[in-house]
Image (cartoon, grey):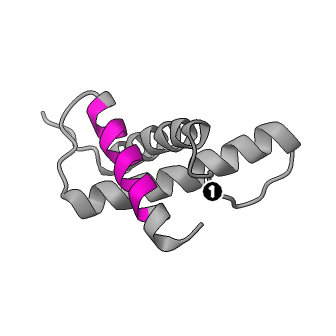
Amino acid sequence: MNIIAWIILGLIAGAIAKAIYPGYQGGSILSTIILGIIGAFVGGTLMTVIQTGTLQITATAFSLPGLFVAILGALVAIWIWHMINRRAYY
């Protein structure tokens, strides 16, 4: 997949994931794109593990199922980011 398609898929998946995830995430459009691209890699890798049983670093295709998997991966990436950066407010 070329870089323009990666950016478009990342923007769409990251924006939808940020809209779905509860709470405030912050960040700019660039962070949304990066989050979506990371989500495409996370989702693609998880789907490859589920389908084939082997661990391969892959990304999703630019399609409707690929977008769905990228959104799920972006949600996982948001969750991991919040677990790393959470602060205790006491």
Which residue is drawn at the image coordinates 52% and 44% (left, top)?
70
Q: Position of residue 73 (x, y in %)?
A: 52, 43
- View extreme (left): residue: 90
- Nearer to me, 45 or 2: 2
Which residue is drawn at the image coordinates 62% and 52% (left, top)?
61
Which residue is drawn at the image coordinates 53% and 35% (left, top)?
68
Quadrant including the N terminus:
bottom right
Principal SS element in the magenta part? helix
| Region in magenta | 7-19
Q: Position of residue 42 (x, y in %)?
A: 58, 50
- Is residue 74 toward the left or the right of residue 54 in the image? left
- Nearer to me, 87 or 39: 39
Q: Position of residue 35 (x, y in %)?
A: 38, 54
**Residue 33 is covered by the magenta coloring:** no
**Residue 36 sits above or below residue 22 on the image:** below
Q: Which residue is mark 1?
A: 59
Please count the marks in the image: 1
Quick one: label 1, few (<14), some, or many (20+) residues within 10 Å?
many
- Is residue 3 toward the left or the right of residue 28 in the image? right
Q: Residue 65 appears in which quarter of the rendering? A: top right
- Is residue 65 toward the left or the right of residue 55 in the image? left
Quadrant including the C terminus:
top left
Q: Secondary structure at mark 1?
A: loop
Residue type beneath disc 1? Ala
